[in-house]
Image (cartoon, rainbow, N blue to C red):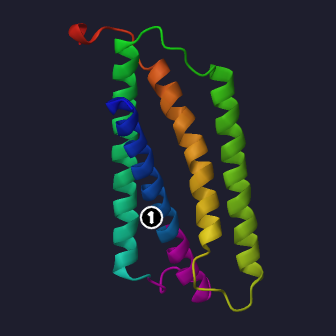
């Protein structure tokens, strides 16, 4: 397998781990606030949860930046590479984003109906959010590189 595929797979894995950390920390902070009667000012999650949130954001940002740079370099070196149709990428983003928002809204409504609010994070929800988030971000990387000015210019001109 080529080094390019290994690097892109590594960026994907790092992004998925980062999204898992991000969504877990966000869910933990919201559960902590709901368990305290919905008062987010008095309910504070442990500091380690905020560290996980920050580390997840860093992983996502670095992996997305790495993927955009590598994919644009690949397209400059291989200008005849066929790409996903733009309409298909936009449909995937819209459907996945809608499903993500609907899933979060349904989960929030379910949490509000619970008398003792559970304080444990639901791993199934986190998996759902990560998969839908990946289905939003991956086509956005492809579209972003396609619309970026100068991705078709040879490397020697940059």
Queried whether the magenta region covers residue 94, the answer comes back as: no
| Residue at x 42% of width, y 9% of height | 79
Expressed as whole percent of the image width and height from the top left, the position of residue 44 reads 44, 83
Direction from residue 29 to residue 129 in the image, left or right: right
| Residue at x 48% of width, y 27% of height | 144
Expressed as whole percent of the image width and height from the top left, the position of residue 137 reads 53, 41
Expressed as whole percent of the image width and height from the top left, the position of residue 65 reads 35, 38
Q: Say if 53 sits above or below 16 in the image.
A: below
Q: Say if 26 sits above or below 72 in the image.
A: below
| Residue at x 64% of width, y 66% of height | 125
Residue 74 or 65: which is nearer the viewer? Answer: 74
Q: Residues within 10 Å of mark 1 (few under 14, many from 20)?
A: many
Going by the picture, which residue comes out furthest to the front?
A: 1
Q: Which residue is mark 1?
A: 21
Examine the image and state in which quarter residue 5 appears.
Answer: top left
Q: Which residues are magenta?
A: 26-44
- Where disc 1 sits, the SS reads helix
Expressed as whole percent of the image width and height from the top left, the position of residue 19 reads 48, 56
Q: Is residue 124 visible?
A: yes
Direction from residue 121 to residue 103 in the image, left or right: right
Q: Say if 76 sits above or below 114 in the image.
A: above
């Amino acid at each position: 397998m080529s080094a390019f595929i290994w690097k892109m797979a590594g960026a994907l894995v790092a992004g998925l781990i980062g999204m898992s950390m991000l969504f877990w920390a966000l869910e933990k902070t919201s559960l902590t606030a709901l368990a305290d009667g919905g008062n987010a000012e008095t309910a504070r999650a442990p500091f380690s949860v905020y560290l996980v949130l920050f580390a997840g954001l860093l992983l996502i940002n670095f992996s997305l930046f790495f993927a955009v740079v590598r994919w644009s370099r690949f397209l400059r070196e291989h200008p005849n590479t066929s790409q996903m149709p733009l309409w298909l990428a936009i449909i995937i983003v819209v459907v996945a984003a809608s499903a993500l928002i609907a899933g979060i809204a349904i989960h929030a409504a379910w949490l509000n109906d619970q008398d003792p609010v559970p304080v444990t994070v639901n791993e199934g929800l986190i998996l759902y959010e990560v998969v839908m988030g990946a289905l939003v971000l991956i086509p956005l990387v492809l579209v972003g590189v396609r619309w970026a000015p100068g991705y078709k210019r040879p490397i020697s001109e940059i």
